[in-house]
């Protein structure tokens, strides 16, 4: 039996503005702007509509939704929906279960392992 390791990091900012962590909100806005090719505004007067909409989570979601609905505007592409059902190649048992384990005998194997322990 194997287990994957994990490490979680939590960032807590004490500067709260309008119910949001100011540092995390600014990081999210700049990260999304960088991914979408939106230039960060140096001043309020220089801010573009996209930059302003990226400031809040709800309007940032709407930016992505609106861009996708409009074809992406060269900024993003929709996620591939996958192959059509008639284009999927059936797999053999060897590919589906590469270890070749007979799943019908799991209960007996588990019982044997418990008895050994």
Image (cartoon, rainbow, N blue to C red):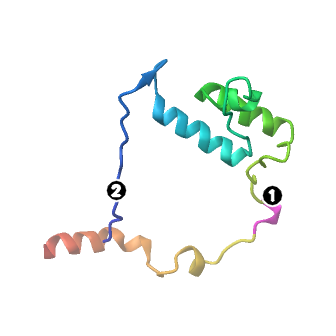
Q: In the image, is residue 1 above or below residue 70?
A: below
- The residue at the point 56 percent across, 39 percent down is 28
Q: Which mark is residue 10?
A: none
How many numbered badges does the structure rendering display?
2
Magenta range is 84-88
Q: Residue at x 60, y 36 (%)?
A: 29
Tell me if label 2 and label 1 are in contact, CB under 8 Å.
no
Q: In terms of secondary structure, where does tag 2 sit?
A: loop
* N-terminal label among 2 and 1: 2
Quadrant position of the C terminus in the picture: bottom left
- 37 in the magenta segment: no
Residue wearing tag 2: 7
Eye-nearest disc, 2 or 1: 2
Residue at 52 percent across and 76 percent down: it is: 97
97 left or right of 116 in image: right
Left or right of 92 in this view: 39 = right
Q: Is residue 85 magenta?
A: yes
Residue 11: % across, % down? 37, 41
Pick whichever, 71 or 48, lies toward us: 48
Q: Which mark is residue 84?
A: 1
The residue lying toward the viewer, choosing from 61 and 12, is 12
- Overall secondary structure of the magenta section: helix
Whole-percent x, y for residue 30 in the image:
61, 40
The residues tagged by marks 2 and 1 sit, at their Cα atoms, a distance apart of: 37 Å
Q: Where residue 61 sits in the image (x, y, percent)?
A: 66, 32
Give the residue drawn at x 30%, y 71%: 1
Above or below residue 104? Residue 7 is above
């Amino acid at each position: 039996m194997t287990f994957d390791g994990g490490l979680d990091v939590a960032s807590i900012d004490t500067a709260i503005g309008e119910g949001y962590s100011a540092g995390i909100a600014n990081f999210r806005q700049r990260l999304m702007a960088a991914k979408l090719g939106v230039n960060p505004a140096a001043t309020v007067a220089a801010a573009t509509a996209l930059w302003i909409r990226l400031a809040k989570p709800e309007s940032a979601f709407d930016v992505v939704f609106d861009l996708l609905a409009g074809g992406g505007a060269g900024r993003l592409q929709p996620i591939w929906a996958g192959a059509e059902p008639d284009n999927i190649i059936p797999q053999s048992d060897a590919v589906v279960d590469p270890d070749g384990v007979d799943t019908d005998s799991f209960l007996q194997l588990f019982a044997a392992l418990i008895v050994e322990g």
